[in-house]
Amino acid sequence: MSSMKDWTTARVSKNVRRQAKRLEMLRAAARLFSDHGFHETSLDKLSDAIGAKKPTLYHYLGNKEQMVFECLKIGIEDVHQAAEHAQCGPGTRAERLCAFLERLAAVCIDDFGRCAIQVDDKVVCEEKRIELRALKDETRTLMLGLIEDGMADGSIARSDPVLLLHALVGALNWPARSSDPTASPGSDNSAAKLVSQLAHGFLPR
Amino acid sequence: MSSMKDWTTARVSKNVRRQAKRLEMLRAAARLFSDHGFHETSLDKLSDAIGAKKPTLYHYLGNKEQMVFECLKIGIEDVHQAAEHAQCGPGTRAERLCAFLERLAAVCIDDFGRCAIQVDDKVVCEEKRIELRALKDETRTLMLGLIEDGMADGSIARSDPVLLLHALVGALNWPARSSDPTASPGSDNSAAKLVSQLAHGFLPR
């Protein structure tokens, strides 16, 4: 029994290592796709940046389209997870929205988040694009629900919830899109400051 | 003398017609580049959409890189013009900022504005990219100046001006980037509503 358990543990830990290695490789790919665009990122560049020969790359990650699909999916899943988490957080709906937006700001400057923002999902085939858009739609419904509930309970000012959602997402997406290096929130509390600006507005209170 | 004047008028009007035709062709190109991406927009597609044979296209607009450069430049120039105009507008700095943001919202959903937002300037050569980025930097300096002056005179709430600028630009850019059709401000006063949300914040006052 003990050897059976050892064998299982060894197998699990091999799987974990494999997954960790895969994720690390995907992260390097996501960074290249964001920085140079999908079309400008050749397999040679990927192989150099990841530090693996092309057959190894293919073995772990598949072809270039499969790689970009995985990167986009992880980026969108991170936002989805943050939106799900916000549903049951502590505090008023407005406070949950602020907490979610801070988390979103962090995702937007992470390698996978940047990739999902910068790389157009038109680069993957229709079937995969439908999968990505369904996940985006689900995320959007969660975020919109939080805003609508907040407007209903009075913790968020009444206005057009769809417009507000787009304004907030656009504001937080911006650092990932901008070619201006000062746009990226640094290691200080920029994300919190940004969310506070959006919460309070730019007119004096 | 009269025939000389007629000749000059005819020549000027021919030039005006030529410029108008050129702009109309460029607008169709900008729409294609935004909707399908630079790489996916072939000369065949451009020729079909513009309704002109490839040699005519080349005669008026040059090659594909020259076309996209012109489209990006017009989009950025439109924002630059709006920012310049805002410097000397009526009202407080906060009111000028609101007026500028409403104009920016309109540029962001125009064909050239959408193209400048969606198409990465990495697709043009370095020399042209430097020209585009210089114009962007100048525009950014104008916008930042308006925000800083407003914070100094008290009409805009004191906060981090760079973060605020990025949040505002990002919020207004979003409709052009989103694959969600509800994101685009319709023919109602969405731009004004969006600017008001950003001005007042999402917390109740």
Image (cartoon, coloured by chain):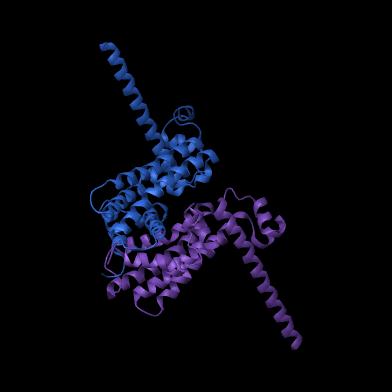
Chain colours: A blue, B purple
Q: In this view, does A200 lie to the left or right of B187?
A: left
Seen from this angle, which residue lies furthest bottom? Answer: B1
Which residue: 42% across, 53% down? Answer: A177
Seen from this angle, which residue lies furthest front? Answer: A152
For the residue pair B188 and B106, the one nearer the viewer reads as B188
Q: Is residue A162 above or below residue A21?
A: below
The answer to whether one can see residue A125 in this image is no
The answer to whether one can see residue A128 in this image is yes
Q: Is residue A184 left or right of residue B187?
A: left
Marker count (numbered) = 0
Quadrant of the image containing the C terminus of chain A: bottom left
Residue A3 placement (x, y as % from top left) = 28, 11
For the residue pair B131 and B144, the one nearer the viewer reads as B144
Residue B123 placement (x, y as % from top left) = 53, 52
Seen from this angle, which residue lies furthest right? Answer: B3
Q: In this view, does B75 lie to the left or right of A169?
A: right
For the residue pair A42 and B29, the one nearer the viewer reads as B29
Which residue: 60% across, 62% down? Answer: B27
Q: In this view, does A98 lie to the left or right of A169?
A: left
Residue B74 placement (x, y as % from top left) = 54, 65
Q: In this view, does A55 lie above or below A195?
A: above
Residue B192 placement (x, y as % from top left) = 42, 69
Quadrant of the image occupied by residue A26: top left
Quadrant of the image containing the N terminus of chain A: top left
Q: In this view, does A169 lie above or below B60?
A: above
